[in-house]
Image (cartoon, rainbow, N blue to C red):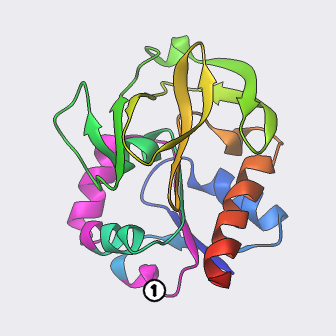
């Protein structure tokens, strides 16, 4: 199993370390040729505007969008969720637009508004969620399964093989969300 991790900007190394601790082979995605032969992909937290710009400049945007639309499993955290969203309520720019959700960028305010909260995550159990300048999902479209809420706001959702999360599971020591994602990857490989 090979998981590609978008490595143009953001918290990609933390995802790589967590996945490698689970025995998974990872490839940093820095150019278009890195996209071949993947079983899944991680879109990390960071600056969604910068990631969007670099995906376009590196000619990775359309191939990545096609792969995700074709069913490639994706774990998108924080900025990654913004990249997946079909709509962003407080920004006209859309990147991949493959997940039928409306997301609010920087919904919890500035860096000083960062916080941690324990909440249930469907199929995983109670999870310590780390929010850093995080978005949340304002509206989930048809076929989107809500997996977690914090203070009534959607913080995790799944649409087919796309897992969008507003917090940072890669920053704690808990590997269960990454394991959940790997089960999605294994399920696709078996079909």
As drawn, which residue projects farthest toward the front?
A: 142
Instruction: Count all numbered tags in the image, as a single digit.
Output: 1
Q: Does the magenta stretch include residue 150?
A: no
Residue 146 seen by the camera: yes
When asked about the image quadrant of residue 127, the answer is top right
Task: Report the residue at 42% width, 59% height from top.
Answer: 8
Camera-side residue of 118 and 158: 158
**Residue 105: percent from left, percent from top:** 36, 28
Residue 183 versus residue 95 in the image, above or below: below
Q: Does the magenta stretch include residue 57?
A: yes
As drawn, which residue projects farthest toward the left?
A: 92
| Quarter the N terminus occupies | bottom right
Camera-side residue of 94 and 101: 101
Q: In this view, does 25 lie to the left or right of 51?
A: right
**Residue 154: percent from left, percent from top:** 52, 27
Task: Report the residue at 58% width, 17% height from top.
Answer: 114
Residue 4 versus residue 52 in the image, above or below: below
**Residue 125: percent from left, percent from top:** 82, 36
The residue singled out by tag 1 in the image is 36
Residue 42 seen by the camera: no
Q: Is residue 12 left or right of residue 57?
A: right
Label 1 element class: loop
Q: Is residue 91 left or right of residue 115?
A: left
Task: Report the residue at 53% width, 34% height from top.
Answer: 166
Magenta segment, which residues?
33-62
When asked about the image quadrant of residue 19, the answer is bottom right
Task: Report the residue at 66% width, 28% height from top.
Answer: 130
Q: Dot 1: few (<14), some (14–19), or many (≥20) neighbours within 10 Å?
A: few
**Residue 17: percent from left, percent from top:** 74, 59
Q: In this view, does 47 lie to the left or right of 181?
A: left
Camera-side residue of 56 and 82: 82
């Amino acid at each position: 199993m090979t998981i590609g991790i978008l490595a143009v900007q953001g918290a990609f190394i933390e995802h790589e370390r967590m996945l490698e601790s689970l025995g998974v082979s990872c490839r940093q995605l820095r150019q278009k040729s890195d996209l071949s032969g993947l079983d899944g992909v991680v879109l990390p937290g960071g600056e969604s505007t910068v990631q969007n710009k670099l995906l376009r400049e590196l000619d990775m945007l359309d191939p990545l969008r096609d792969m995700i639309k074709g069913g490639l499993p994706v774990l998108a955290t924080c900025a990654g969720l913004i990249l997946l969203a079909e709509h962003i309520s407080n920004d006209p720019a859309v990147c991949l637009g493959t997940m039928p959700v409306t997301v609010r960028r920087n919904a919890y305010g500035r860096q000083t508004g960062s916080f941690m909260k324990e909440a249930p995550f469907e199929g995983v159990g109670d999870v310590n969620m780390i929010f850093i300048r995080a978005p949340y999902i304002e509206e989930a479209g048809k076929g989107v399964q809500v997996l977690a809420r914090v203070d009534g706001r959607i913080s995790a959702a799944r649409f087919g093989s796309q897992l969008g999360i507003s917090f940072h599971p890669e920053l704690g020591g808990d590997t269960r969300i990454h394991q959940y994602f790997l089960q999605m990857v294994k399920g696709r490989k078996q079909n």
